[in-house]
Image (cartoon, rainbow, N blue to C red):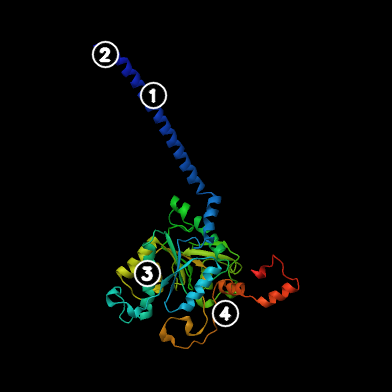
Amino acid sequence: MGPMRAAVPVLAVIGIIVIAISYHSSSISDSRSSVTSSAATNNSADLFSATHQAALAKHAHNASLGFGEIVYISMPERTDRQDAMNLLGSAFDLKLKLVPGVRGSEIPPKAVPDGAPSDLRASVLGCWRAHANAWRYLLESDMDTLLIFEDDLDWNPNVKKTLETLSLQMQNSKIRLTEPSNYERQHAPYGLDWDILYVGTWRHGGNPELKEFVQVWDDPDVPEKEELVKATKLLDALYEFGLTDDEIGKKRVLSPAYLTMSTTAYAITRKGAQRLLYTLSYVGLRGDVDQEITRLFKEGQLRGYTLSPPAFSQFKVGGSKDSDNEERGKSLDGHGNVNGQNINIKGSARAWMVNSLKMDNWADYRRLREGKINDRDESMS
């Protein structure tokens, strides 16, 4: 019995120590939890700050313009266009990844989507397949978004600033259906509430029953009214969006996508890639991929936005080089790259690139001999 009685006080002391340690640990845990909760609250609050939004919008200046990646579609044999896209990318510090075009005549009949018309041109089928491959590329990656170009492209030389402003507008959108998640506020410069973001289309127009859903802002890089091509119906759309004569040429509009045409330049989210593959591959295909996308917008099966005027444009050189369709003739008559033209954008990235690469080496040496060149002469870069 003696040893047992002696052990009781010892056990009591040990019990008190255990309780004290448990209480202390609990206090530390509660304190850490409180600090973590407080930090999370502060971080959440920071996501709404103008400073954070401005920093996120600056992603538009990176090598993918704030999207996961940029890809462009080009037929394997169009090395001329691939050279041009490579030049443009390097001139503007953009990383462009090639997605090879597809020859429709080489698509096996069993791989053609259900419902495709029997007289669907091979070029239309090949165009659809190439874009579908780009959609799949996004889904096979861990990216949230993908910007898709075609290879006959030009853009506003200040496109990074244009997209930075677009990001700020979309972060503070007045036409979203839902509030942005904290993940969007932290990681997505353009949000993720859309399937397709059209930044380069030559047809524009909103849902006639919902004209009030537009977001308008000033942009110094909008083309003058006289430069807008009437055939694209862009002017009509701008009036329908509520712009006045004084505002056209000064303001840009973001609207829910409804009337679009061409696949010149557009971005997709993961959900958008899923919906496109589902509706235009798994379910079926009725015609040209750009017209099919417009149909899906009108039917409400896709959700997106259109930037008007656009930031990107097709670039035309004239003659058969403007098309990959062999049936349009074999003549190579045209104006050539240096004299090509875009539509509905201000300035030309291609023209800027040409001017930036021009030089006269021997004229520079003559200027050096005459003492007219110094260490800061930009023309020598």
**Where is mark 3, residue-wise?**
133
Q: Quadrant of residue 268?
A: bottom left
Residue 278 point in image, percent of width and height: 33, 66
**Which amino acid type corresponds to the residue marked 4 in the rendered image?**
Val
Residue 94 visible in the snapshot = yes
Q: Position of residue 195 (x, y in %)?
A: 41, 63
Q: Which residue is mark 1?
A: 20
Say if 46 sits above or below 118 in the image: above
Q: Which residue was labeled with disc 4?
A: 338
Classify 10 Å Cα crowding around label 2: few (below 14), some (14-19), many (20 and above). Answer: few
Question: Is residue 181 in view?
Answer: no
Q: Residue at x 35, y 78 (%)?
A: 104
Alpha carbon distance from label 1 to label 2: 26 Å
Badge 3: residue crowd in 10 Å (few <14, some 14–19, many ≥20): some
* Residue type, numbered disc 3: Asn
Q: Which one is in front, 117 or 137? A: 137
Residue placed under numbered mark 2 in the picture: 3
Q: Amino acid at mark 2?
A: Pro
Residue at 33% of width from left, 67% of height from top? 279
Numbered disc in front, either 1 or 3 = 1
Q: Using the numbered discs, state the Cα–Cα distance from disc 4 to disc 3 in whole angstroms.
A: 31 Å
Residue 156 image label = none
